Amino acid sequence: MPDSSFTHRKQGGGELPWWRHGLVYQVYIRSFADANGDGTGDVNGLRSRLPYLRELGIDAIWINPWYQSPLADGGYDVADYRQIEPRFGNLAQAEALIAEAHDHDIKVITDVVPNHTSDQHAWFREAVTAAPGHPSRNRYHILPGKGANGEKPPTDWPSVFGGPAWARLPDGEWYLHLFAPEQPDLNWANPEVNEGFQDMLRFWLDRGVDGFRVDVAHGLVKHPDYPDVNHDSGDVLATAKDRNHPFWDRDGIHDIVRTWRTVLEEYPGDRMMVAEAWVDPERLPLYLRPDEYHQSFNFALVESEWDAEDFAAIIEKSTRAAAEVGSTPTWVLSNHDVMRQATRYGLPKGTKLRTWPLTGPFDVLDVDAGARRARAAALVMLGLPGSAYLYQGEELGLPEVWDLPPEVLDDPVWENSHHAQKGRDGCRVPIPWTVDGPSFGFGPGEPWLPQPEDWGSLSVAAQDDDPDSTLSLYRDAIAARRRYCMDDDSLEILDVGGPDDHVVAFRRGSGLSCVVNFGPGVVRLPDHTEVVVRSDHHGHDSADLAPDTAAWLL
Ligand code: GLC
């Protein structure tokens, strides 16, 4: 029986914009498919795999930054926002990709990085070659240091990647980099910065992109007085609860976002912006006001463990919060910055995921449980109202390659943390497409990160025709999602067992219900007439649900 019900808002008439319940597939282009054989994924590789994505049933792709870049942070260090990085291809190929994706009925979201540029960007080159005081320096945060000879950084701000957030220029001034030193922060108090950014948005909108994923959306505005953060006040990099934090979630951000929204409104069709905003959940709705972002990532599931109570609370809170601002929730189980869920869910609760790949203990990893739980979690995410973001390889059940040898690590986190964290390469290992062959079909060359030897068994080719594979589960669930989950936003939380049953269940407006067993024991499925999809075995018709599994019922 239902014990709570909310967001019963059947949408009367009129088509909802696609992004409100779109399924967006995240392409980490460097690791998706390599057409030219240089070991790095590229635009033409992605073009060749569009039929695969069409068959998977997704609505849109989000492409991680593909712009000209030294790749000091995998492309989040942009040297020229209007050029494609030559290792990825060229502008003509990008234009062809956008057109071909549209031919396949797939929307295209590009990643834009407003908080910082590369240190190779023309603006930064100009700033550092100009003398102190030159106006070009004012596009960045370039300041004299403290101390008798300016030898101390202007503030005590730490970098997200480790170490101080300031680096010194040869002339003695300091520049701010909240991320790697190769990523100087732009100064959004200078109107030229926004003018340039809006032109760049138009450049890509003119080329037909359907939306933007906005990187570090909570970081743009810095306190004009550059106060210290005071390291004793806890984790200054964590989600800022402080309304006056010197660099996170400052109120001035919203005026900037409104100007971008105005640009998007100049274009026909449902163009959208989704924010990567790591802010206090209570502040998130501010980013979703009608003249700001269309959506924001909701990282609650990424940050949660495999736990019935946590999942239930997240589903309820996220859905309610979105409804309060007239929006739909978004769901993310993984992305290019976090440990893949097939591994995450196989680790004991409380494991420190950032350091575990270095410290272990390694024998606590339960690979099978992780894989089972990741499959069940997929049915949760795909069955919920709102839009879902699926990270490449998730549909293959790929695990984290947590044991990459240190000498191949490329993520700036490894060096900047002084080898305290291996960083994020373990979720960025190139995709296996074929059972054997060089780099399992990723491309003809040596891949930029080595793939585990057994990855052929997880490849697309190995899973394609196997009805029990994770790929088949995703295809089936995505097809059923289209049929049963996209007509309305309604969600009813069901109480299908006692409090100790560790079961989470919800029902959609179509009548489809999702039941998930998080507990150690087998549970009885509630009454139903049909099992639409289940995360254990295809065609498995038991009336029971095993531990760590989920089923969609009618
Ligand atoms: C975002 C990206 C991450 C990148 C960082 C700096 O968090 O997702 O990959 O390192 O921004 O641009």
Image: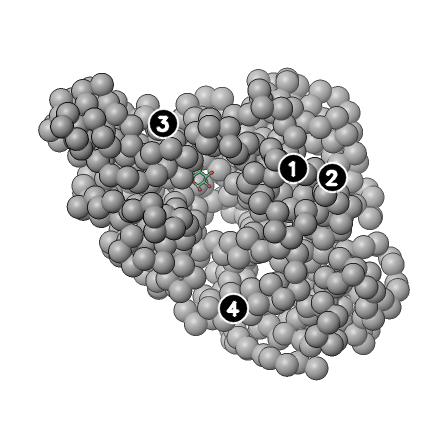
As helix, strand or loop, the secondary structure at mark 1 comes to loop
Q: Is residue 239 visible?
A: yes
271, above or below 170, in the image: below
Q: Position of residue 409 (x, y in %)?
A: 55, 25
Beta carbon of the mark 4 residue lies under 8 A of ligand 1: no
Q: Position of residue 68 (x, y in %)?
A: 40, 26
The residue sitting at 75% across, 70% down in the picture is: 501
Q: Along the horizontal axis of the image, is 549 left or right of 144? A: right
In this figure, which residue is indicated by the disc labeled 2? 363
Which labelled disc corresponds to residue 182? 3
* Amino acid beneath label 1: Gly
Quarter that holds the C terminus:
bottom right
Q: Residue furthest left?
A: 133
**3 or 1: tag closer to the N-terminus:** 3
Q: Are marks 2 and 1 in contact (CB under 8 Å)?
A: yes
User: Closer to the camera, 519 or 30?
Assistant: 519
The residue sitting at 29% across, 52% down in the picture is: 245
Q: Position of residue 188 (x, y in %)?
A: 24, 43
In this figure, which residue is indicated by the disc labeled 4? 317
* Amino acid beneath label 2: Asp
Q: Quadrant of ligand 1?
A: top left
Measured in 3D between alpha carbons, the distance from the residue under mark 2 to the one under mark 1, in whole angstroms, is 8 Å
Q: Position of residue 56 (x, y in %)?
A: 67, 46
**2 or 3: tag closer to the N-terminus:** 3
Measured in 3D between alpha carbons, the distance from the residue under mark 1 to the one under mark 4, in whole angstroms, is 33 Å
The residue sitting at 37% across, 37% down in the picture is: 159
User: Closer to the camera, 433 or 311?
Assistant: 311
194, above or below 284, in the image: above
Which labelled disc corresponds to residue 360? 1
* Amino acid beneath label 4: Lys
Which labelled disc corresponds to residue 128? none
